[in-house]
Amino acid sequence: MAFNDRNFRGNNFGAPREMHKATCSDCGAETEVPFKPDPERPVYCRECLPNHRTPRENRRF
């Protein structure tokens, strides 16, 4: 099997991801995200995120 970068992207080889607490900018629910939230940008919980994503057919990469 050839090396495929997609299989390794975002994978810390079994190490748990560091999660950060945040408050959803839409519903105000407490949530955890796998990145350090930037106070200048909104953060959405799992339920609200799809409402803010560009439909797949319009995405660039």
Image (cartoon, rainbow, N blue to C red):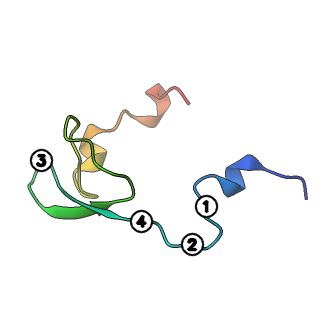
Q: Earlier in the sequence, mark 1 or mark 4?
A: 1
Q: Nearer the viewer, residue 38 or 31?
A: 38
Q: Are marks 3 and 2 in contact (CB under 8 Å)?
A: no
Q: Earlier in the sequence, mark 1 or mark 3?
A: 1
Q: Using the image, tell me which numbered label, if any, was put on residue 18.
A: 4
Residue named by callout 3? 26
Along the horizontal axis of the image, is 50 left or right of 39?
Answer: right
Sort mark 3 into few (<14), some (14-19) or many (20+) by Cα contacts within 10 Å. Answer: some
Label 3 to label 4: alpha-carbon separation? 23 Å
In this view, the mark in front (1 or 2): 2
Label 3 to label 2: alpha-carbon separation? 31 Å
Q: Are marks 4 and 2 in contact (CB under 8 Å)?
A: no
Q: Splitting the image into 4 quarters, where does residue 33 fall? A: bottom left
Residue named by callout 2? 15
Q: Residue 53, image x and y in percent?
A: 33, 38
In this view, the mark in front (3 or 2): 2
Q: Secondary structure at mark 1?
A: loop
Circle 1: residue type? Asn
Q: Secondary structure at mark 2?
A: loop
Q: Secondary structure at mark 4?
A: loop
Circle 2: residue type? Ala
Along the horizontal axis of the image, is 2 left or right of 29?
Answer: right
Label 4 to label 2: alpha-carbon separation? 9 Å
Q: Residue 55, image x and y in percent?
A: 39, 34
Sort mark 1 into few (<14), some (14-19) or many (20+) by Cα contacts within 10 Å. Answer: few
Circle 4: residue type? Glu
In this view, the mark in front (1 or 3): 1
In this view, the mark in front (1 or 4): 4
Label 1 to label 2: alpha-carbon separation? 8 Å
